[in-house]
Image (cartoon, grey):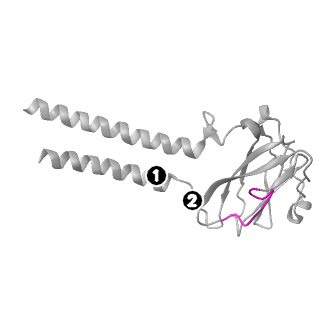
Amino acid sequence: MRRFRVLRTSAALLGCLCVLLVFGAPAQAHSPLQEATPAPGSKVGTGTSVISLKFPGLASGSTPKVKLTGAKGASVPVGKPEVADDSVVCASVGRMRAGVTTLTYRVSAADGDRQTNSFQFEVADGAKAAAAPDACQGLHLAKPAPAAERDGSDTILGIDRTVTLVLFAAATVVVLGGVALALRTTRKARSA
């Protein structure tokens, strides 16, 4: 009977952890990226000043988040993103240095589901700068703020907010499960 209780407790903890990992992870199915400038895996010049991401449809009034991490983990300043035609995210960017750059974005689909994803492209000296797409041409894009002025609201302790929250939830489940198991073992030892 005791073995069954320990097994049941372990199974319940494992089930809670699985639920947290499945439902705590960002949604990936509703707003697939259709086009991007610069495109994933492309090579662009250091003079590229506007990035764009096209989706099938974004939530009206939502504010997407865009982050660029350049060579050697250096943050690249990004202006406040604007949405054109309810499907294209446009943002101005600061000067990028040569090297592999990672673009991370978070958007809300028209049905309200959120998606966080990232891709990489190469910035090279002497390469042609990526031209701003037509959808971004008429927008008055905010200039990127220097690194010291950005609020860092997309991170917790320097780690992506979503990853931090999932790890915190998983750690909480493990700690609470350990405490429950320790209390149960202590009660069994006292009664024996």
Tell me if mark 2 has few (under 14), some (14-19) or many (20+) residues whose alpha carbon lies within 10 angstroms of its own.
some
What SS does tag 2 mark?
A: loop
What is the C-alpha distance between the residues marked 1 and 2?
12 Å
Q: Position of residue 26 (x, y in %)?
A: 56, 55
- Asked whether, in this view, residue 10 is left or right of residue 129, the answer is left
**Foreground pick, 15 / 131:** 131
Looking at the picture, tell me which residue is in the foreground, 30 or 99: 99
- Magenta residues? 32-41
Q: Tag 1, which secondary structure?
A: helix
Quarter assignment of residue 132: bottom right
Residue at image location 91% in from the left, 47% down from the top: 47
Residue 59 in the magenta stretch? The answer is: no
Label 1–label 2 contact, CB within 8 A: no
According to the image, label 1 marks what residue? 21
**Residue identifier under label 2:** 27
Question: Residue 114: x, y in percent?
Answer: 61, 58
Q: Amino acid at mark 2?
A: Ala
Determine the residue positioned at 80% across, 41% down: 77
Q: Is residue 75 above or below residue 10?
A: above
Give the residue displayed 87% in from the left and 45% down from the top: 143
Q: Residues within 10 Å of mark 1 (few under 14, many from 20)?
A: some
The residue under label 1 is which amino acid type?
Answer: Leu
Q: Position of residue 38 (x, y in %)?
A: 81, 56
- When the figure is inspected, residue 30 is found, relative to residue 95, above or below; the finding is below
